[in-house]
Image (spheres, coloured by chain):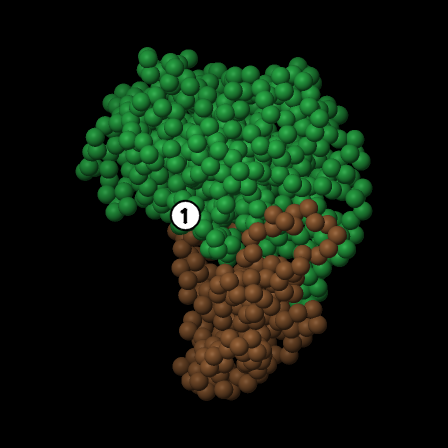
Amino acid sequence: MSEPPSKFPSRRRFVQGLSLIPVVAVLGSCGSRSGNATGTDAAHKPYEPRFFTASEWAFIVAICDRLIPADEIGPGAVELGVPEFLDRHMQTPYASGAIWYMQGPFLEAAPEFGYQGRLALRDILRVGIAEMDAHCHKAFGGKSFAQLTAAEQESLLEAAQAGSLQFDNISSKAFFSYLLGEVRNGYFADPAYGGNKGMGSWKMIGYPGARADYMDWVTVRDKPYPLPPVDLAGKRG
Amino acid sequence: MATVRPKVDAVIVGMGWTGAIMAKELTDAGLSVVALERGADRDTQPDFAYPKVADELEGSVHRKFLQSLSQETVTLRHSPAEVAVPYRQIGSFKPGTGVGGAGTHWSGCHFRALPEDFKLRSNVEKRYGRRFIPDGMTIADFPVSYEDLEPHFDHFEYVCGTSGKAGVINGVIQDGGNPFEGSRQREFALPPNPNYLGAEQFYVGARNMGWHPYPIPASNASRPYVNPYGCQMGPCNFCGFCSDYGCINYSKASPNICILPVLRQRKEFELRANAHVQKVNLDADGKRATGVVYLDGQGREIEQPADLVLLCAFSLYNVHLMLLSGIGSPYDPKTGLGTVGRNYSYQNLNRVTLFFDKSVQANAFIGNGGAGTTMDDLNGNQLDAGKAGFVGGGIIWARQPGAGPVRGISVPRGTPNWGTKWKRAITDSFRHSFYFEVQGACMSYRQNYLSLDPTYRDGFGRPLLRMTFDWNQNEIKASQFLVSKAQEMSRTLNPVSMIGDAKKDGSHYDTTQYQSTHTCGGAIMGSDPKTSALNRYLQSWDVPNVFAIGANAFPQNNGYNPTGMVGALGYWSAKAIRERYLKNPGPLV
């Protein structure tokens, strides 16, 4: 995976080769959904990214697993389909800057004025991933981010969050902040967008999702809200 | 060349609250009215229908109900010495667009200003002396009184089905309301909404402090209701998609459900959506508006001649249009001369979040935008400003418009932003925390103002509006004082932990964090044409057939949400137009 993009294996071979945790996890979650008699053959196929390249996809899967890992508290971002969400979300007008003011000049300004660069969200992620992988290649003997140990990945994420990694084309802090925001969006947004499969994150925190009617529960104090979530498609969690 | 449409009596720029109010009042008077709205036409069905609205990604990330900044935004800087940069992504404030404007995605808090808020400068000078007002603070009295506006406050509340409890009716204090409020002529249109946990706990905490808690007046209907125009509202079901969202239930008052159903039936009224006004046209000597020029949905330039031009856009864009059109003289902070752009003010918002254990069912997902509990014990004349050391008070409130995980989950101090510890914290906090907020007044200053940006342009080639704004020591002190009071009250409720965010000494305006959409001033009403853009009827001093209705008219902002005041000013201005201007068009003062 240290070759330049033109020499990457085909996506199909790549996905097969990526029999790491993520693919197993995605299949596992689909398997449990089929237990609700809603599974189809299509649901068993791993998602094939259309926006991210193979090396970007490996990065995305790895970072999802670091930012929101599977643990005893609840499902992780990978098993809930957050990489799929990200790949689909990066193809929306929103990620191309549809609601951002994108005209120059692009001046440096104090952090109180927010991101002032010229990249749209999808390019912030794409450029940031390339910068992070390039940094890893140099610092870890040709390895990509996805090939590092969990502990190595975590310390890199902490450095990016603090803005102490020096990237050329995006501040590591801005990259991290947008990436984390997007991973959270995918983890928590309606399952229609590709993440939060089975409303797993909503069940974890006790969010009833799209129920949107609590008239009978405003003044109830002595017991937890009893109903499971529903999603925009009307499915119950 | 622009296509010229047939002349009408009045053209209205913007179809939010003030546009709808003015259109209703002027068509009542028999005028022909064309309203031009830059955004799309919208209504409860299909735009705010369930289940589509219950989608946090669309509402709070893609900002479906807000203005896109791609074509139009403002630039920002902290002081006149800096170069401004664009407000590229929605952060500190959220302008709306489309029919209904910000009146569709607001929360519903519906206050009246206090009588003393109208006389701020003279009241402060009388109580604390002239020297108590710091150098450079440019606060002014409103050129109208509470008594002038009372009938209009009342009417607007009845149009909106405002749900609350009166504190003073005809001078007699009422149990359960705000004893410090200006006297009302009657009870609210509807009784208060039920209390969620935080609103109930606010009563406990406020009484522990010796304060006088009362229900926030909320234009979120607590009962089925028919307003004076015959428009129907349904009771709020606490759906939790309120602030930032259109209402699924005909519960949150909006121009769309409270006024437009009548207007849409009227022959004298024509609404043109996707009609983006570029400029107000003036005659050769610049003393009279002849109409407006707009771009239609195809990008064609259309001229709409009219006898009266009513600027009813969001406050910032009213100021922008005045500057672009040469209505009034641009304000210059160096000389203090000029009127358009001066006295820009904002709102001083701060939050305290309380975390409890799992036995406490706070249910943050249950929400009603406007309802909750507040108190006025540190607002208006109740605040001993001399002792507190700042001008302008504020309120503390419990409000829960409805939270969801995409919108963000507050976590105790020291929690990491990701990983297992973060997952533990959000899972523990989501159903078991609520917050109180401090909403402080914001004074106006010589150096906080609006002007045209010299560099950045909008999608139509016009200069962007430039906002020069930063916190002054007065507001930082107010933040620290009010947040410390909110924390003191919160501690009496024994939370497991708390986080709060008073402004620190020397801190600057952070445009990336949402605070408030209460952007005020810039084209203020006043009694002196040298220091105000509008007279007491919101009529331009310079071009008397132009009126600019909105929070742009506030000389400074008080501790309340502005919508109640904005609506009342609309009705006040409309009355003057109907009863005096139409008989004798010209300056009303």
Letter of the brown chain = A
Residue B471, by quadrant, is top right
Q: Is residue B319 above or below residue B362?
A: above
In which quadrant is the C terminus of chain A drawn? Answer: bottom right
Q: Mark 1, residues whose alpha carbon is within 10 Å: few (<14), some, or many (≥20)?
A: few
Letter of the green chain = B
Q: Is residue B251 visible?
A: yes
Q: Tell me the residue that label 1 is attached to.
A: B45
Q: In the figure, is residue B158 to the left or right of B187?
A: left
Image x and y of residue B280, in percent = 31, 30
SS class of the residue under badge 1? Answer: helix
Residue B22, by quadrant, is top left
Q: Is residue B552 visible?
A: no
Q: Residue at x 49, y 71 (%)?
A: A84
Q: Amino acid at mark 1?
A: Gln
What is the chain letter for disc 1? Answer: B
Question: How many numbered discs?
Answer: 1
